[in-house]
Amino acid sequence: MGGDHQSVKDVMTSAPITLPTNALASDAARLMKDQDIGDVLVVDGDNVRGIVTDRDLVVRVIAEGRDAMDTPVGEICSTDIKAVRPDDPVDEAIRVMRMQALRRLPVTQNGKPVGVLSIGDLAMERDRARPSPTSAPRRLIRDRSRMTKAQLQRAVDARK
């Protein structure tokens, strides 16, 4: 993943789900459930103001005894967020995520949301870029009928 000069746009999830600051926490929860996602970008007009995550709903609404049907996402979203641009290198986004201990980064173009980059996106890309240790044995088993015994032994030895 790193080192091959990929851009954020190559890895991010496009078309992020957004809600205005006055939408309710219950709206965010419903969207997360329906879309099978863990975050919603909070916007003021066309510009990203913050991000609300499933954890924010638990910690800032439920654990504090607030009513999700009466709590605007603008009050519970994280607003001190760092966004990246689609053309930024993935390595830079990873650095930001590590330095700020973030699991998700909004991706913006001229302040407007165009995607979200998550740890899950990065993990999926890593898995696509290099085979996992468990995929090699499966491939070996699948391909072994086409190999001679010596070829099979060399393949096994090469993986050690």
Image (cartoon, rainbow, N blue to C red):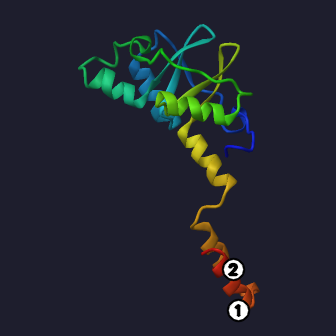
Residue type at tag 1:
Lys
Decide: few, some or many residues near mark 2? Use Cα within 10 Å; few <14, some 14-19, many ≥20: some
Please state which of residues 131 and 99 is positioned toward the viewer in this rendering: 99
Residue 9's label in the rendered image is none
Q: Position of residue 48 (x, y in %)?
A: 58, 14
Q: Position of residue 36 (x, y in %)?
A: 50, 38
Can you identify the residue that label 1 sits on? 149
Residue 72, above or below 125: above
Q: Secondary structure at mark 1?
A: helix
Which residue does the image show at 51% across and 19% down from the upper left?
A: 81
Count up the numbered dots.
Answer: 2
Which residue does the image show at 67% across and 53% down from the upper left?
A: 128
> In this rendering, does residue 13 appear at all?
no
Say left or right for 114 vs 133.
right
Q: Earlier in the sequence, mark 2 or mark 1?
A: 1
Q: Residue furthest left?
A: 65
Residue type at tag 2:
Ala
The image quadrant of residue 105 is top right
Q: Position of residue 114 (x, y in %)?
A: 67, 24
Residue 155's label in the rendered image is 2
Quadrant of image for the C terminus: bottom right
Please state which of residues 37 and 83 is positioned toward the viewer in this rendering: 83
> In this rendering, does residue 2 appear at all?
yes
Q: Secondary structure at mark 2?
A: helix
Decide: few, some or many residues near mark 1? Use Cα within 10 Å; few <14, some 14-19, many ≥20: few
Q: Residue furthest bottom?
A: 149
Residue 152, above or below 42: below
Say left or right for 20 vs 157.
left
